[in-house]
Amino acid sequence: MRQHAFQTLQDRWRQQPHQRPKLELLVDLTNLEKTGKFNELADWMHTYHSVHGVHLVVLYLCCGELRLPWAFQVWRGKGTPSPAQLALKLLRTVPSALLLGKRRSRLHADGGFESTEFIQGVLGRGLDIVVGVRCNRKLEDGRQMRDLMVRGSLVEPCGLDQAMCVSWVWLYRNKKPEQRFVMSNLDLGGKYLARVGKRRWRTLRLFQNGQGPLRT
């Protein structure tokens, strides 16, 4: 799977040598709910956020219209590496040759990966990040994310030693609109950061609906 993805990206870039498209990485925790007994999956079956089944941390590579699954790790329950730690492990499998180029690669993740350890790990690898964040995450000035009134505000979340740009989007999947916050180390502006956040959810639905190369 990795060899195919690597070759596909290299072929695409050879076709566009003067304007190499930006590589974007997408991390997601996919919950495969299971009911009943599965003896062969005994070590993989756990409950996470009230969902019992197999929980996969999956890394996708996205470049232009390409949507390529790259690698995955199985979360093995409490007392083992967290999904965020598994995601950092997956990032280390991406060859440096794929991350080269004038346009710096960007990683997208949801609120399950908002830990300080994960964000600093991503930035430490020379990647930019756009990550979902809980509405009650605290800021250094004592406020919470939900207290912000202006999209695109530059704030310092507790535990991070740098300013982050924050915006939010409204999802209308249920009867009641759902507000989702997103932040980035890049000062993208409120409207653009919100669009980037929405694009991530659309990409995930592509995979989860079985319309991409990996059915979940």
Image: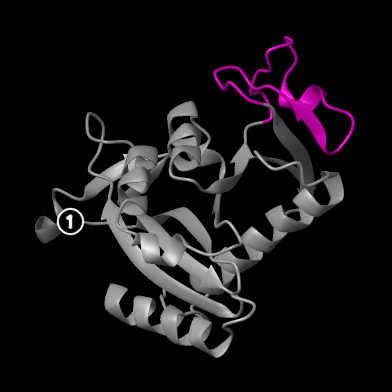
Q: Nearer the viewer, residue 84 or 187?
A: 187
Quarter of the image for residue 164 reads top right
Viewport quadrant of the C terminus: bottom left
49 or 94: which is nearer to us? 94
Residue bearing the label numbered 1? 37
Q: In which quadrant of the rendered view does residue 31 lie?
A: bottom left
Query: Residue 163 in the image: x percent, y percent?
Result: 69, 27
- Image quadrant holding the N terminus, namely bottom left
Estimate the x, y position of residue 90 in percent, counting from the top left. Answer: 33, 53
Q: Quadrant of residue 146?
A: top right
Q: Is residue 177 left or right of residue 201?
A: right
Q: Main secondary structure of the magenta part?
A: loop
- Label 1 is placed on what type of residue? Lys
Measured along the vertical axis of the image, is residue 53 above or below residue 212? above
Residue 98, percent across and down? 42, 66
Q: Which residues are magenta?
A: 135-162
Residue at the (57%, 83%) spot, across then down: 17
Question: Residue at left 47%, top 67%?
Answer: 61
